[in-house]
Amino acid sequence: MRAFIKNYIASEKARREEEGEKGFSLIELIIVVVILGVLVAIAIPVFGSIQATAEENATKAVAASAATQWTAQLANNEPVTAYKSGDAKISLTGQPAAGAAIETVCATATYDRAVDYVAKSGPGC
């Protein structure tokens, strides 16, 4: 089949050169469209999984950063301040009270989406 298509395309090119025609034949355009369709069919699921992985990793990073900040503030006897993730879709809970033990720190981050990602981090988790 592959040799047939190759020979057909070569004969069509030769015929067009003899007759002085310019442009692409219909079969050449169909082949290009099919190839592009296959590439798109492969690329869309790959992109979706990359985006989901990025959202999950962002949730884990927010939980880890908040736990680190709160633990450091408790260790230095500083007031515990709210952690700002910078992402409106990630909600954070578990801020310890001032003077709490470091071993009780547990930050829980949730990515608000159809499938919620939940990540916990800290010595108390």
Image (cartoon, rainbow, N blue to C red):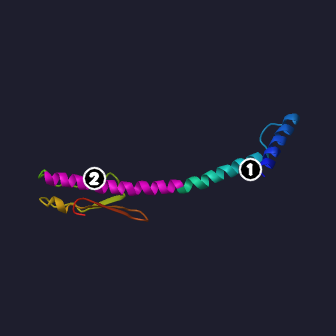
The residue pinned by badge 1 equals 30
Q: Is residue 34 left or right of residue 121?
A: right
Mark 2 packing: few (<14 Cα in 10 Å), some, or many (20+)? Answer: some
Task: Give the magenta part as a residue range.
Answer: 46-75
Majority SS type along the magenta span: helix
Q: Is residue 28 left or right of residue 80?
A: right
Judging from the image, what secondary structure is the residue with disc 2 in?
A: helix
Label disc, if present, on residue 65 of the rendered structure: 2
Seen from this angle, which residue lies furthest right? 19
Specify which label sits upstream in the sequence, 2 or 1.
Answer: 1
Judging from the image, what secondary structure is the residue with disc 1 in?
A: helix
Work out whether residue 69 can be spotted. yes
Q: Is residue 86 left or right of residue 40?
A: left
Q: Residue at x 13, y 59 (%)?
A: 98
Seen from this angle, which residue lies furthest bottom? 115
Work out whether residue 79 can be spotted. no
Q: Residue 64 magenta-drawn?
A: yes
Amino acid at dot 2: Ser
Q: Residue at x 16, y 61 (%)?
A: 97
Q: Position of residue 40 (x, y in %)?
A: 60, 52
Q: Position of residue 71 (x, y in %)?
A: 19, 54
Q: Position of residue 78 (x, y in %)?
A: 13, 51
Per the model, the C-alpha gap separating discs 2 and 1 is 52 Å
Mark 1 packing: few (<14 Cα in 10 Å), some, or many (20+)? Answer: few
Q: Is residue 52 left or right of residue 64?
A: right
Amino acid at dot 1: Ile
Q: Position of residue 24 (x, y in %)?
A: 77, 42
Q: Residue 111 magenta-drawn?
A: no
- Say which quarter of the image contains residue 53: bottom left
